[in-house]
Amino acid sequence: MNMAVEIHKQLDEKADLKLIKKIINLYEKLKNEDDDELMSFEDMKAFMHDLVGESTPADSVRIYRDRENITQKELALKSGIKQQHISEIERGIRPIGVATAKKLASALNCDYRSLL
């Protein structure tokens, strides 16, 4: 039986079958390390939107910081942005401009566009 259909059944058919197929396809590409087949930034952004819904810049900064396993204070030191500002960004109080996004992205090892 098709792996996506089996997963769909195990989830009591509450999940979107197309999305399950996309996830399996991405997993297979990453598992096989087929660099020619990896998604572009725009494709990955669209995929993640389908997967988790709309995310805010605050969510993105927090997720990337968690991925790097660093504190706000450590991010402040790496990026040159005040820790208080990072806290405000993560709480959605302070907007992220392009210059700030580039500094954060450099410290978080990600594309700055994913923080806007």
Image (cartoon, grey):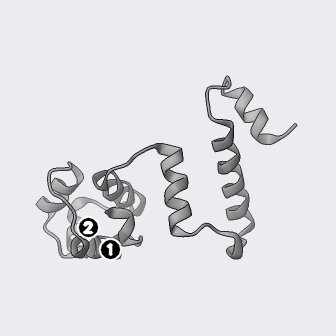
Type of amino acid under label 2: Leu
Tell me the distance, in whole angstroms, between the alpha carbons under discs 1 and 2. 7 Å
Residue 22, position as x, y percentages in the image:
66, 50
Image position of 4 (left or right of 41): right
Q: Quadrant of residue 89?
A: bottom left
Mark 2 is surrounded, within 10 Å at the Cα level, by few (under 14), some (14 to 19) or many (20 or more) other residues, namely many
Q: Image quadrant for the C terminus?
A: bottom left
Percent across and percent down for residue 10 are 71, 27
Which residue has dot 1 on it? Answer: 107
Between residue 76 and residue 19, name the one nearer to us.
Answer: 19
Q: Which residue is mark 2?
A: 75
Q: Position of residue 95 (x, y in %)?
A: 18, 59
Whether label 1 touches label 2, CB < 8 Å: yes
Question: Residue extending furthest top?
Answer: 12
Question: What label does residue 95 carry, if any?
Answer: none
Mark 1 Cα-neighbour bin, 10 Å: few <14, some 14–19, many ≥20: some
Lateral position of residue 32 relative to residue 2, left or right: left
Which of the pair 71/22 is nearer the observer?
Answer: 22
What kind of residue is marked 1?
A: Ala
**Would residue 73 appear left or right of 34 to someone viewing this image?**
left
101 or 64: nearer the eye?
Answer: 101
Secondary structure under badge 2?
Answer: helix
